[in-house]
Amino acid sequence: MLVKYLLDTHTWIWWHMRPEKLSRKVKGLIADPERYEELLLSAISVWEFCKLLEKGRIGISCDPEEWLAVALAMPKFRLVPLSPPIAYRSTVLPQALSSDPADQIIIATARDENATILTKDAVMRGYKHVRTMW
């Protein structure tokens, strides 16, 4: 049975900018669409990317909207909007978690979609109420 995977923001950015920073397992998985049902990305990750650009924490050599269009055109890819149920569920997650609202939204999205999060983030990986892989 194929699984859905949700890309954490850094995983999505690294896939397109610095794939060498990804684990061998995650890189191999993303590169082979036969190994997954869908690749998902929370809409909050697009916003996080744009904030990183705004703050000068990352740079790109093309128009940001062009970069986004290319980065969102992946096989079996679906952008998951921030729906009212996901917004609410991000505020009532079981067990204490990081106070980062974007992380909470990503986790709530993964739980809502029954997806495994592809993340290097130790806090997310240690959270027992969601599946992760790195």
Image: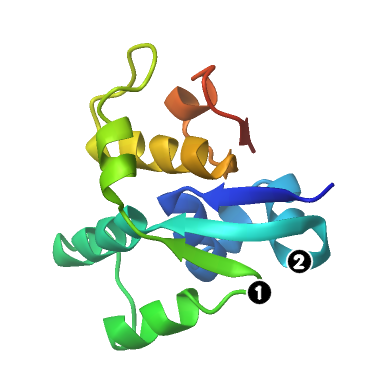
Q: Is residue 130 above or below residue 54?
A: above
User: Label 1 is placed on what type of residue?
Assistant: Pro
Q: How is the image coloured?
A: rainbow
* Quadrant occupied by the C terminus: top right
Q: Quadrant of residue 96?
A: top left
Q: Which comes sooner in the sequence, label 2 or label 1?
A: 2
Pointer 2 residue: 33
Residue at 47%, 75% in the rendered image: 71
Give the number of the disc on residue 14: none
Farthest residue, direction top? 95
Q: Does the CB distance between marks 2 and 1 fall below 8 Å? A: yes
The percent coordinates of residue 76 (x first, y second) are: 65, 70
Name which residue type carries label 2: Pro
* Rendered residue at 32%/32% (across/down): 89
Instruction: Say which element carries label 1.
Output: loop
The local secondary structure at tag 2 comes to: helix
* Residue under label 1: 75
**Residue 32 in view:** no
**Above/below status of 2 relative to 104:** below
Residue at the left extreme of this rendering: 55
Measuring 38% from the left and 11% from the top, which residue is drawn there? 95
Q: Position of residue 99 (x, y in %)?
A: 23, 25
Residue 117 or residue 91, whichever sits in front: 91
